[in-house]
Amino acid sequence: MIVYLNGDFMPVEQAKISPMDRGFLFGDGIYELIPSHSGRFVGFNLHLDRMNNGLDAIGIVRPDISVRQWLEISQQLLERNEGTDLGIYLHITRGDEGRRYHAFPEKVTPTVFAMTTPIFPFLGEPDSETQPGLSCYTAQDKRWKRCNVKSTALLGNVLHFQDSYSRGGNECILYNADNELTEGSASNVVIVNDNQIITPPLDEQILPGITRHLMIESLRKEGGFGVSERVIHMDEVRGADEVWVTNSGVHILPVVTLDGRPVADGKVGPVWEKARACYNRHCF
Ligand code: PDD
């Protein structure tokens, strides 16, 4: 695999990062995952904007790389690595000061790393006959209080995901201390009730997902869907007609069981089929 590190492309075996890098020591960094399908990126600029917002939010100086250069790096990685549906993973840390000390170093150059990563296979047009839904478990959200920042420090997310995975689940759906839906450990969550498509509002409890954004935009553009962003109690989730998760790897997928119980009749829902087709029309 060919990766990019601090200005150069190289085989992954040659990519060396110091153990003194704050990304390694503190998880002090920001990342992105940008999907590509048949060589075309989905939401490229939106991902870069979110990455820059994240860097600003935690005070990492943006690397001197223009949008055009990011695109060039990402395209180079696609070309130099095998595969048609690959994600571009970008990872920027505060850098390496040569010691472990909590305060931000005064003079340090951020470490910039990028690679391709397989994403879940693109699923094509939705098909309720062949497209199985996901099984998810739920848990109280134990992560930090700035989940709008796409931090590389993902231990909270990893532990939640593993908790679900170890029970055969595909994702862990999280709720806050007030029993309100937040998001998945690696996805945003959407429910459907009486044909209304509802997802939690953007705040510090969730990542502003690019897929979520593109989905809402495409549904509103095309019309005919009722879409709202509002607080959702977990009772509503458990009683929903449909539950979906969205992220840059799977785009939009239906959840058919929650904590071992079926969502509605346990089948892939009709609103998902229409919404997924609408999203595909606008985003691919
Ligand atoms: N995760 N919420 C969380 C906690 C996430 O980790 C992700 C994505 C999302 C969805 O964001 P987007 O639609 O922009 O991918 C929401 C990526 C895929 C990851 O960690 O690999």
Image (cartoon, rainbow, N blue to C red):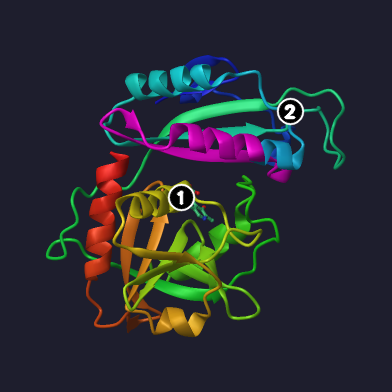
Residue 59, above or below 146: above
Residue occupying image coordinates x 60% and y 70%: 141
- Tell me how far mark 1 sits from mark 2, CA to CA: 26 Å
Looking at the figure, which quarter contains the N terminus? Answer: top left
Residue occupying image coordinates x 19% and y 56%: 126
Q: Residues within 10 Å of mark 1 (few under 14, many from 20)?
A: few
**Going by the image, does 161 lie left or right of 85?**
right
Q: Return the x and y of residue 151 as percentages of the image width and height.
A: 63, 46
Q: Residues within 10 Å of mark 2 (few under 14, many from 20)?
A: some
Q: Is residue 26 magenta?
A: yes
* Three-letter residue code for mark 2: Val
Q: Give the magenta-colored segment's residue range.
A: 25-53
Residue ID for mark 1? 213
Q: Return the x and y of residue 230 as percentages of the image width and height.
A: 53, 69
Q: Which dot, 1 or 2, sits closer to the camera?
A: 1
What element does badge 1 sit on? helix
The circle drawn on residue 116 is: none
Confirm if mark 2 falls within 8 A of ligand 1. Answer: no
